[in-house]
Amino acid sequence: MAKQPHLDDFLVPFYGNGKKSETFALTDYDTAAKPFSTGTKQADRERLAEFAVRLDEMQERLHAQRCERVLLVLQGMDTSGKDGTIRAVFHEVDPLGLRIAPFKAPTPDEAAHDFLWRVHAHAPAAGELTVFNRSHYEDVLVPRVLGQLSHGDLVRRYHHIRQFEELLADSGTAILKCFLHISKDEQRRRLQSRIDDPTKHWKFDVSDLEARKQWDEYQAAYRDALTATSTERAPWYVVPADSKTHRNLMVAALLLRVFEGLNLAYPPAKESLKGITIA
């Protein structure tokens, strides 16, 4: 009987210390895999809808308690589905305690500071669930591929990222990092769809094609970044992303597990409210 998949089968091993793993490889993960599928796309959507309701309940407890914090980091190649994941996973979540922080190329002011300066301001506050759509990892991916960082600078940035995430964890932040793993062929189909469909033209940027030419370089940059920064308190998971429905389902399942590990509860009733009847 085949071994049943487990979420931790997609956990990036904890190597850390900036060391390059000789065993971890993104090519070992099938981008088209659907290990947690319930059988059909419709069944998966129904399961995701159940997860979405549960996430809303968990997030309400988080917001009411205002003690813990949750950070979800979404990274991936262009068209891997960061925006789509956010729409699908959080459509039931009350926006009161949910914040989405997108990160694009640094502005001149941001670039004049250390690379984590712009990121720390968007870390979740007590009672808040924050999603990073791209993140501080852009600063160890793009500059590396463009040859703007020396090896020493890159290793130091990995070190600073681990320390930064350790600080967040020490401050009561539960961190989940998901690499949305898409194939080059599926990216081609999605990029072509953006060109062919006038309603998607706004999503397309010619720079996406330049990044596509450097596919292998980006895959290597992701491999090394994930290896160097996957830790017990801030783990990386490889999420197969060729199937949008399954991608969303898996991210929701991972996030639910994070919430369940927090043992959240509503604050106790206020003594001052007992016996009050509203006329």
Image (cartoon, helix red, strand yellow):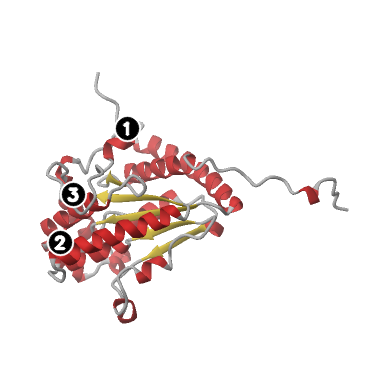
- Where disc 1 sits, the SS reads loop
**Alpha-carbon distance for marks 2 and 1?**
31 Å
From this view, report whether residue 277 is shown above or below residue 126. above
Choose the circle earlier in sequence order: 3 or 2: 3
Disc 2 on helix, strand or loop? helix
Could you tell me which secondary element the residue under label 3 belongs to? loop
Q: Residues within 10 Å of mark 2 (few under 14, many from 20)?
A: some
Q: Amino acid at mark 3?
A: Ser
Residue contact at pointers 2 and 1, CB within 8 angstroms: no
The residue tagged 1 is 6
**Residue 250 in the image, given as x and y percentages of width and height:** 35, 41
Residues at marks 3 and 2 touching, judged by CB atoms closer than 8 Å: no
Residue 214 vs residue 222, the one in the foreground: 222
Q: Is residue 253 above or below residue 163?
A: above
Residue beneath disc 2: 212
Q: Is residue 64 left or right of residue 51?
A: right
Q: What residue does disc 3 label?
A: 183
Q: Earlier in the sequence, mark 2 or mark 1?
A: 1
